[in-house]
Amino acid sequence: MERLTGTVTVLLIGSLPPKELNRLAASLSLQDVRREKKGTSMRLRAEDFNALRHLLRGSGLKVRILKREGLPFVRVMLRHKAAFVVALLASLLVIWGLSQTVLEVRVSGIHNETMKRQLLELMAGLGAERGAFREKVDPRAIEESVLRSFPNLTFASLHQRGVTLELFVVEAVKPPEIFRRSEPVNIVASCEGLITKVTVLSGMAWVRPGDTVRQGQLLIQGYDPSSGSVHANGEVYARIWQTGAGEAELYETVRVPTGRAHERMVIRCLGLEICLFQGKVPFKDYNISKEGGFLLDGLYLPIAWEKQRFTEVELRRQQREEEEVRRQAAQRALTDALNLVPGGARIVDKRLEYSKIGEEKLAARLTLESFAQIGVSVQDK
Amino acid sequence: MLDKAKIARELGLARSVMTGETRIHMEGDARMIIEGHSGLLEYTGESIRVRAKGMLLHIEGEKLMMEALTAEDLILVGKIDKILLLKPEEC
């Protein structure tokens, strides 16, 4: 309440005897009364100030105003600073406008970039785009439209979080492939190998254990002498060999810190990046570490700050340990070979060979021997 | 003659309501509220003398300040070290 009515802190210069203080207290409400070197200071309501001067008339005390607080004085101050008031109001208006505007639209829940783009385009068509007025966005209508337009989505939810619109979607799980008995299908080899076991449930086997087959070769034909075309069904196991290759550098470039460092502060807003202090990095080669966040957690203002620390490094070329190079090349070859091995295969043997490529690289070649079911169904043409 | 203190006790009222005596509240040694005083007699940053009904209140301390002062009430803050209740004849 005092803030609304205003208070004045005054210093009464001179000797203020208790009797005089009692006289003032009888008429006014005095606060924070204390003895100072030059006199007595006290705080009173702004409206009582004139009464105080009147009561002190003839007492020989001088009144000095130390502080004015409260709304009445702010109003007087603002009356003389019209430009400041206009700028303040304009700033508040801009901040309010920004807080009511959509400044970012996101899609989460899926990893397919093409679908994300399509969803963003659809949302933009429905008014949910950057720059739109938040109140104009109808989440329910957008969610329904998304589910109608993308049958492979089972769930869509649009959240408004400050100036950010986030669409969360869930993709439908595809049903398993249906086995159609009536459809004529052959079983062919998915890779070349040496047949070890053939089990036919329907159709006619074209290979026997001990045969070698090439990729795509017919293994079980979808044909039965009694009933004609059938859906071939069965399993063909074979011993297969897959070869993977990998390389590793014999030399490496290491980054050795020199001990020199440089820091700068970056402010980001709506795609703009502003370096606040010492923007140019004085090093040719450097490591960078970043630390930052959003102002007000990005809730109402899309302004991010980032403190960047650049540590100068010197690039030095040095030979790597041979054991480590071999291990890395072998690991890469193994990864490459495993990509070629069909799922469910049982690896029974491996052979690893190394060779140098010039002076710079070491190559590894890994051959995996495994047992696997190599038959895959293909439509009979 | 009516014994106001006895009436107040019988009615379960605060004694000062009937007798008009000064009430003193303390909050540790940092704040003191005096209700119903009759005026200041002396005031410095180290001591204060207040006239109360039938006695004088002498308070000593450090950095004493009157947080509020009206014709009847006084709120004193600071570090209060000593309080003396003096009869008028002792002053």
Image (cartoon, rainbow, N blue to C red):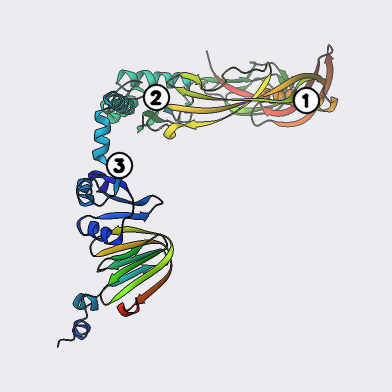
Label 3 lies in what chain? A
**In which image quadrant can residue A359 be found?**
top right
Query: Alpha-carbon neighbours of circle 2 within 10 Å: few (<14), some, or many (≥20)?
Result: some
Between the C-alphas of marks 3 and 1, the distance is 81 Å
Q: Which residue is mark 2?
A: A104
Between the C-alphas of marks 1 and 2, the distance is 46 Å
Instruction: Tell me which amino acid carries mark 2.
Output: Glu
A112 relative position to A15: left or right: right
**Which of pointers 3 and 2 lies earlier in the amino acid sequence?**
3
Q: Nearer the viewer, residue A27 or A344?
A: A27
In the picture, the disc for residue B24 is none
In the picture, the disc for residue A68 is 3
Percent coordinates x, y for residue A9 in the rendering: 31, 47
Q: Residue furthest bottom?
A: B1
Q: Nearer the viewer, mark 3 or mark 1?
A: 3
Instruction: Tell me which amino acid carries mark 1.
Output: Ala
- The image shows residue A272, relative to residue A323, as above or below, that is above
Instruction: Tell me which amino acid carries mark 3.
Output: Arg
**In which image quadrant can residue A77 be found?**
top left
